[in-house]
């Protein structure tokens, strides 16, 4: 074999090296304790943790409910809850407004002053019985992803419009949640910005994890989704556009066997030259095994082909409660306080797994929820 070909093979092998993740301890360190830090009863961590370094040198972390607040401190290790509200949806009665109840679910900043955000927007049709006679939360739930931006370092955000939604008008008769749901963090690759979203299948829209990208974070309508061969999908707004072909405005799920649940967190691990994605789900570790509930990870060199998921932590989830336990977790995110990224989108050989811990009363979920973190070691094979 010629040296050039051999060198190329070595480089390809290095690029494909699989990282290894392991919890160093299952003892959780508190970041936010509801009984100690909450500004009101519903002030709870209800999204994965997102963080950025501001122009003033402080770190902001958002993991909030629909009345969005942030934690602020001199480092990721020392953030404290700030009770000032940084964003809340307008509670508009029209689903086409995409501005009912919104959770900040992804953030990105280039300078620490202008903060771009993606919002998980829920239209609660159960409060509008003329639009959804079932008057039931899940039966009347339509979701979309919208954008917001801050010009003051994250102290306040303004609504910027629709990013991604279904190409079908809300009719109130689906009988289940429909739409484009919760995002991963935003991360940069080859000069563009990417994010995963979760599409819950409806008609032409398949169910699965969809990958979106843009070159212009400040333009909500510039995001395009992967269509199976390239990033050619523009999400249509059926309430503002006439005679659209829905099949041309749906995304193609990426690696459905590996990304079988909402992708909550994506980070770059330089030592293995791989992206690491974190999910919470129940999955079999072998074809004949009982599904294991917990936090799983998978990796990729190109964002499109992902390795078989591996278990990071077997633990009850919000979606898979163990009524014999006093706790369950959800909304995992991997963050490294020493990241060289202003947006904490890279990790080294150690990081923290941030999760929302739900403190159960019997088998009942209450507002008593904490944000905690567990240490993770990451190595390259």
Image (cartoon, helix red, strand yellow):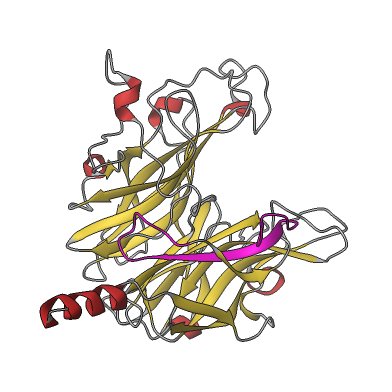
> How far from the left and from the top, in percent, is residue 98?
41, 34
Q: On screen, 250 above or below 115?
A: above
The C terminus: image quadrant: bottom left
Q: Which residues make up the magenta segment?
A: 284-307
**In the orientation shown, which residue stands out farthest toward the front?**
1
Q: On screen, 228 above or below 51?
A: above
- Residue 166 left/right relative to 270: right
Question: Closest to the observer: 252 or 223?
Answer: 252
> How far from the left and from the top, in percent, is residue 178?
53, 31
- Residue 134 left/right relative to 18: right
Q: Does any portion of residue 148 appear in the rendered image? A: yes
- Residue 219 left/right relative to 277: left
The residue lying at 37 percent from left, 42 percent from top is: 146
289 inside magenta stretch:
yes
Question: Closest to the observer: 365 or 54?
Answer: 365
Question: Closest to the observer: 162 or 263?
Answer: 263
The residue lying at 39 percent from left, 84 percent from top is: 348
The image shows a total of numbered marks equal to 0
> How far from the left and from the top, in percent, is residue 250?
36, 31
The quarter holding residue 314 reads: bottom right
219 inside magenta stretch:
no
Q: On screen, 137 above or below 211?
A: above
The residue lying at 72 percent from left, 70 percent from top is: 35
């Amino acid at each position: 074999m010629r040296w050039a070909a051999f060198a190329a093979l070595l480089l390809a092998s290095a690029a494909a090296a699989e990282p290894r993740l392991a919890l160093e301890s299952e003892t959780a360190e508190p970041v936010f304790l509801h009984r100690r830090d909450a500004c009101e009863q519903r002030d709870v961590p209800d999204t994965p943790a997102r963080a950025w370094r501001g122009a003033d040198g402080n770190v902001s972390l958002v993991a909030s409910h629909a009345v969005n607040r942030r934690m602020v401190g001199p480092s990721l290790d020392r953030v404290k809850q700030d009770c000032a509200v940084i964003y809340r949806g307008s509670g508009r009665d029209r689903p086409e407004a995409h501005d009912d109840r919104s959770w900040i679910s992804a953030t990105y900043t280039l300078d620490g002053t202008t903060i771009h955000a993606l919002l998980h927007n829920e239209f609660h049709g159960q409060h509008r019985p003329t639009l959804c006679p079932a008057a039931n939360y899940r039966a009347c739930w339509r979701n979309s992803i919208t954008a917001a931006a801050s010009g003051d370092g994250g102290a306040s955000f303004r609504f910027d419009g629709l990013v991604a939604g279904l190409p079908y008008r809300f009719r109130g008769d689906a009988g289940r949640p429909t739409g484009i749901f919760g995002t991963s963090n935003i991360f940069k690759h080859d000069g563009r910005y990417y994010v995963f979203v979760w599409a819950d299948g409806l008609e032409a829209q398949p169910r699965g994890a969809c990958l979106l990208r843009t070159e212009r974070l400040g333009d909500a309508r510039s995001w395009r989704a992967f269509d199976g061969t390239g990033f050619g999908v523009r999400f249509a707004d059926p309430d503002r556009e006439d005679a659209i072909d829905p099949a041309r405005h749906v995304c193609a799920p990426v690696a459905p066997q590996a990304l079988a649940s909402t992708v909550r967190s994506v980070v770059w691990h330089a030592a293995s030259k791989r992206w690491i994605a974190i999910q919470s789900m129940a999955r079999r570790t072998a074809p004949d095994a009982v599904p294991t509930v917990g936090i799983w990870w998978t990796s990729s060199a190109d964002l499109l082909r992902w390795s078989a998921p591996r278990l990071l932590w077997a633990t009850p989830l919000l979606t898979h409660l163990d009524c014999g336990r006093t706790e369950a977790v959800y909304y995992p995110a991997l963050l490294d306080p020493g990241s060289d990224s202003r947006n904490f989108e890279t990790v080294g050989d150690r990081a923290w797994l941030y999760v929302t811990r739900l403190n159960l009363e019997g088998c009942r979920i209450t507002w008593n929820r904490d944000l905690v973190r567990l240490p993770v070691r990451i190595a390259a094979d």
